[in-house]
Amino acid sequence: MIKLTNVNKYYRQGTQAYHVLKDINLQVAAGEFVAIMGKSGSGKSTLINIIGFFDDQFSGQYQFNKIQVDQLKRNQFSDLRNQQVGFIFQNFKLINNLTVAENVGLPLIYAGARRSQIQARVQQQLKAVGLPNVAQQLPTNLSGGQQQRVSIARALITQPSFLIADEPTGALDSKTSQEILNIFQTLNHQGTTIIMVTHDEAIAERSDRIIRILDGQITSDQEVDHAHE
């Protein structure tokens, strides 16, 4: 589904050019659950910004399904982002003065869906993440784990081709982190493709494959052995 070939990324700062990603070659098949691991400054956030159609300033080739992403115009880029990918962030990024239902339904409003259709889909997604009764609450009344579930529901509402989760358990305690990872595994078993960024080994090992990145280069790409579980 996702294929990066010799992708390079430079940042300019004044007269300096920084080589942030170096000859990245990467493939992710539909239905995979992949973890990207690396220290702060390794280039992992830059990489997911390219994969998630946020950053179109790179050299190399990016093929998504049969679309040659590196040749798209900027407006085609944002259409792809809105339709094909759902984002989950470390700090949830919920709008505190909107109800849970309004937060989850927001991407559908942007997409021009009808109100009646939105309500039914919102209820369905909240049920899928184990929160059937919080639609009218404000996010600030929920625990961190519940807020992250709301953000997962929001990411899934447009039925994207894949999810990008950027340090999704970074703000959560270990028990809540495991609950969120259980949701990811359930979604993945139902066919959702997930790319998760983390710096936590134990979290990464819940995925099927770990890609390690250091100084802008992929240093290893290995399947996780779940046989001992």
Image (cartoon, rainbow, N blue to C red):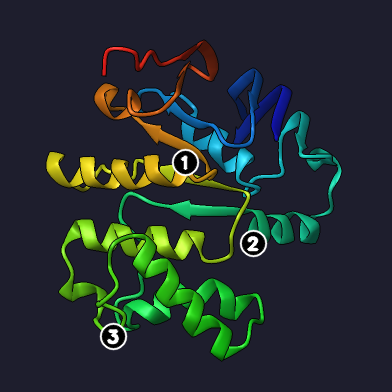
Residue 15 visible from this viewpoint: no
Determine the residue positioned at 56% across, 90% down: 115
The local secondary structure at tag 2 comes to helix
Q: Which mark is in front, 3 or 2?
A: 3
Q: CA distance from mark 2 to mark 1?
A: 21 Å
Which residue position is annotated with label 3?
A: 136
Location of mark 2 (residue)? 82
Q: Are marks 3 and 2 in contact (CB under 8 Å)?
A: no
Expressed as whole percent of the image width and height from the top left, the position of residue 142 reads 18, 69
- SS for tag 3? loop
- In this rendering, position of residue 208 left or right of residue 191: left
Residue 63: where, in percent of width, then height?
Answer: 78, 34
Q: Is residue 213 above or below residue 128?
A: above
Q: Quadrant of the C terminus?
A: top left
Camera-side residue: 130 or 147?
Answer: 130
Badge 3: how crowded within 10 Å, few (<14), some, or many (20+)? few
* Alpha carbons under labels 3 and 1: distance apart: 28 Å
Identify the disc placed on residue 70. Answer: none
Residue 57 falls in image quadrant: top right
Circle nearer the N terminus (3, 1): 3
Question: Mark 2 or mark 1, which has the lower sequence index?
Answer: 2
Q: Residue at x 53, y 81 (%)?
A: 118
Secondary structure of residue under mark 1: helix
Whether residue 92 is visible here, answered yes or no, is: yes
Circle 1 residue: 188
Estimate the x, y position of residue 211 in percent, counting from the top left: 48, 19
Q: Earlier in the sequence, mark 3 or mark 2?
A: 2
